[in-house]
Image (spheres, rainbow, N blue to C red):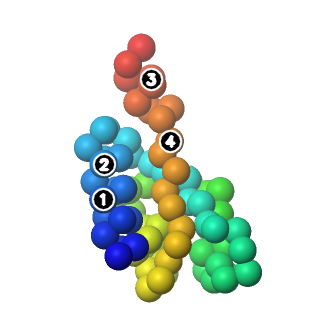
Amino acid sequence: MLNIDGDLTRERQRGMGLKRYTWRTSQDERVRESHRIKEGKEFDWTKPPADTGHPGQDFQCRCTAEPIFTELEAMLK
């Protein structure tokens, strides 16, 4: 189910014209190290991390993609 949620998040954000996101974990003891090191880092929707894919794509991943609105805000000015 989380893969579907991750895919929907990606499509919604890209549909809004957002190109980047900030990786967010659940910040608990169950977060894998490969996901923990991504916490707070920015990624491009066209370039998923090779080892995990985008948030929610890896097996049982509970991470989320926090949208980055700065590019969109700049376009609207």
Find the distance from the CA under tag 1 to the CA under tag 2: 6 Å
Q: Mark 1: which amino acid?
A: Leu
Q: What label sits on residue 8 in the rendered view?
A: 1
- Secondary structure of the residue carrying tag 1 is helix
Residue indicated by mark 4: 68
Asked whether disc 1 touches disc 2, contact meaning CB atoms under 8 Å apart, the reply is: yes
Q: What label sits on residue 20 in the rendered view?
A: none
Q: What label sits on residue 12 in the rendered view?
A: 2
- Disc 3 or 2, which lies upstream in sequence? 2
Residue 37 visible at all: no
Find the distance from the CA under tag 1 to the CA under tag 3: 25 Å
- Secondary structure of the residue carrying tag 2 is helix
Q: Mark 4: which amino acid?
A: Ile
Q: Mark 2: which amino acid?
A: Arg
Please tell me whether mark 1 or mark 4 is closer to you in this view.
Answer: 1
Q: Position of residue 43 (x, y in %)?
A: 49, 57
Q: What label sits on residue 74 in the rendered view?
A: 3
Asked whether disc 1 touches disc 4, contact meaning CB atoms under 8 Å apart, the reply is: no
